[in-house]
């Protein structure tokens, strides 16, 4: 998927802030996994792009805590 629009990723009235946090957390996980495994092939793409693609494809979801709204 080439540059998915934010509205394509967000579902159920999720906030932009939640999207940013989810992408940042997932990108950090991707980077940490690559460093732990000393696997540079995972980082052929930038971790942020990989995280956005994973969220857009539905591989990962944003779960918001309703008590924080």
Image (cartoon, rainbow, N blue to C red):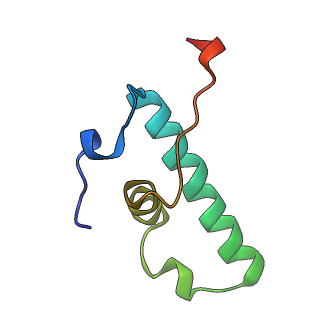
Residue 6 placement: quadrant: top left
- Residue found at the far front of this picture: 12
Residue at the spot 70% in from the left edge and 75% down from the top edge: 35
Image position, residue 46 (x, y; %): 43, 69
Image position, residue 42 (x, y; %): 55, 81
Residue 39 placement: quadrant: bottom right
Image position, residue 9 (x, y; %): 34, 46
User: Relative to residue 32, is residue 64 drawn left or right?
Assistant: left
Image position, residue 23 (x, y; %): 49, 48
Q: Nearer the viewer, residue 34 or 59?
A: 59
* Quarter of the figure with the N terminus: bottom left
> In the rendered image of this protein, does residue 56 appear above or below residue 6?
below
> In the rendered image of this protein, does residue 63 appear above or below residue 42?
above
Residue at the spot 23% in from the left edge and 47% down from the top edge: 5
- Residue found at the far right of this picture: 36
Q: Looking at the image, how many numbered discs can be counted on the residues?
A: 0
* Quarter of the figure with the C terminus: top right
Residue 63 placement: quadrant: top right
């Amino acid at each position: 998927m080439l540059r998915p629009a934010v509205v394509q990723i967000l579902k159920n009235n999720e906030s932009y802030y939640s999207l940013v946090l989810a992408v940042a957390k997932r990108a950090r996980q991707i980077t940490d996994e690559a460093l732990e495994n000393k696997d540079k092939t995972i980082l052929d793409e930038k971790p942020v792009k990989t995280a956005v693609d994973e969220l857009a494809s539905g591989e990962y979801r944003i779960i918001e805590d309703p008590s924080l709204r």
